[in-house]
Image (spheres, rainbow, N blue to C red):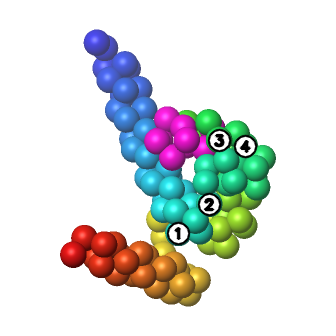
């Protein structure tokens, strides 16, 4: 493999990692809102299959669709792309996560 091919593969690996992180954040938000992939897809104009691929990190979304997701979940666009959580809106998100963990701990007892 030439040096040029190595650089392309490294770039693609980094890009796939970012897609996986974005997908995990979308899945977390969807679970916290208690909506199915189909319900989310209907709300933002995508198929259930496409939502599934996004959550698995297998495909990305256009900036326009990412903006619709941010509006739907009421989170900053920067959170979906980069996981930045400095905004005060994340207080409610963190409380919801804590509630889910508390419920899970009760189930596991």
Residue 65 shows in the view: no
Please give the name of the residue rendered at 62% of the width and 60% of the height, measured from the top-left corner.
35
Q: Residue furthest left?
A: 109
Q: Which mark is residue 87?
A: none
Q: How far is disc 1 from disc 2 in space, using C-alphas?
A: 8 Å
In-image side of 105 versus 103 (left or right): left
Magenta residues (range): 50-58
Residue 61 image point, x, y percent: 64, 44
Q: Callout 4: helix, strand or loop?
A: loop
Select label 1 or label 4 by which is in front.
1
Q: How far is disc 4 from disc 3 in space, using C-alphas?
A: 7 Å
Q: Residue furthest top?
A: 1
Q: Which residue is mark 4?
A: 46
Q: Is residue 99 magenta-colored?
A: no
Q: Say whether disc 1 or disc 3 marks the residue closer to the N-terminus.
A: 1
In-image side of 69 versus 18 (left or right): right
Which one is nearer the viewer's eye here, 61 or 40?
40
Q: Which residue is mark 3?
A: 48
Q: Which mark is residue 35?
A: 2
Q: Say whether disc 4 or disc 2 marks the residue closer to the N-terminus.
A: 2
Mark 4 vs 3: CB contact within 8 A: no
Which one is nearer the viewer's eye here, 29 or 5?
29
Q: How far is disc 3 from disc 2 in space, using C-alphas?
A: 12 Å
Q: How far is disc 1 from disc 3 in space, using C-alphas?
A: 18 Å
The quarter of the image holding the C terminus is bottom left
Q: How far is disc 4 from disc 2 in space, using C-alphas?
A: 14 Å
Q: Is residue 56 magenta-colored?
A: yes
Which one is nearer the viewer's eye here, 67 or 11?
67
Q: Which residue is mark 1?
A: 32
């Amino acid at each position: 493999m030439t040096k040029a091919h190595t650089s392309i593969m490294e770039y693609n690996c980094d890009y796939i990692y970012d897609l996986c992180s974005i997908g995990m954040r979308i899945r977390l938000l969807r679970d916290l809102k208690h909506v199915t992939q189909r319900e989310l897809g209907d709300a933002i104009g995508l198929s259930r299959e496409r939502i599934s691929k996004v959550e698995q990190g297998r495909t990305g979304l256009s900036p326009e669709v990412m903006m619709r997701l941010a509006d739907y979940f009421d989170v900053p666009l920067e959170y979906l792309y980069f996981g930045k959580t400095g905004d005060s809106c994340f207080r409610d998100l963190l409380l919801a996560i804590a509630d889910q963990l508390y419920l899970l701990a009760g189930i596991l007892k």
